[in-house]
Image (cartoon, rainbow, N blue to C red):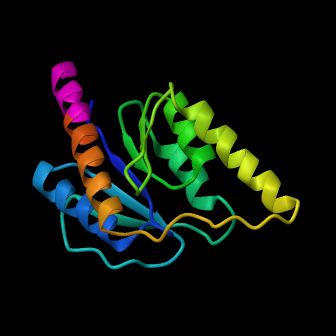
Amino acid sequence: MNIRVWVDADACPVPVKNIVSKAADRRQVETVFLANHWIALPPSPYVSVKLVAKGFDVADMEILQLVTTGDIVITQDIPLASEIVQRGAVAINPRGTLYTPDNMHGHLVRRNRAEEMRAMGFQGGGAEPFGAKHTQAFAKTFDRALTQQLTRSHQNN
């Protein structure tokens, strides 16, 4: 079982793209960035870009078609993360949140509540700007998840 890393890349911060690309090279893990526009990435035999059509959730649907148990998906999309977790793969937010079966319901409830509030005209403050602490949190979570998945993969081969 070879794991892959899938990145929902359209809104993915550049520092996260760099961390994932470097890890793919260092750990020799196939990594695919899905986006509806071309993105620049360092040259690597392990990293590729898959262009998808523009449109709502197009990249998400493509990821759902491609992901398999044990893969890692980087996404800010909470409903996509929920689907990924249900399929036995790992989902991580670019800010370093690891989505799990135990915490996924809470994330969905908060996301849906925020959607309802916006629909009623309430303006929230939104998330704080992406910064160094988020980059560090992501790097730590991603490295831990990648190590765990690679260990499981090698044990199953």
Q: Position of residue 52 (x, y in %)?
A: 55, 66
24 sits left or right of 56 in the view: left
Q: Nearer the viewer, residue 66 or 134?
A: 134
Look at 23% across and 32% down and name the residue there: 148
Q: Position of residue 76 (x, y in %)?
A: 52, 55
Asked if 81 appears above or below 74 in the picture, the reply is: above
Q: How many marks?
A: 0
Asked if 10 appears above or below 151 in the picture, the reply is: below
The magenta segment: 148-157
Q: Position of residue 67 (x, y in %)?
A: 45, 41
Q: Nearer the viewer, residue 36 or 142?
A: 142
> Within the image, what quadrant is residue 43 found in?
bottom left
113 sits left or right of 30 in the view: right
Q: Quadrant of the N terminus?
A: top left
Look at 55% across and 33% down and name the residue there: 104
Asked if 157 appears above or below 75 in the picture, the reply is: above
Q: Position of residue 132 (x, y in %)?
A: 30, 67
Look at 26% across and 33% down and name the residue there: 149
The magenta stretch spans residue 45: no
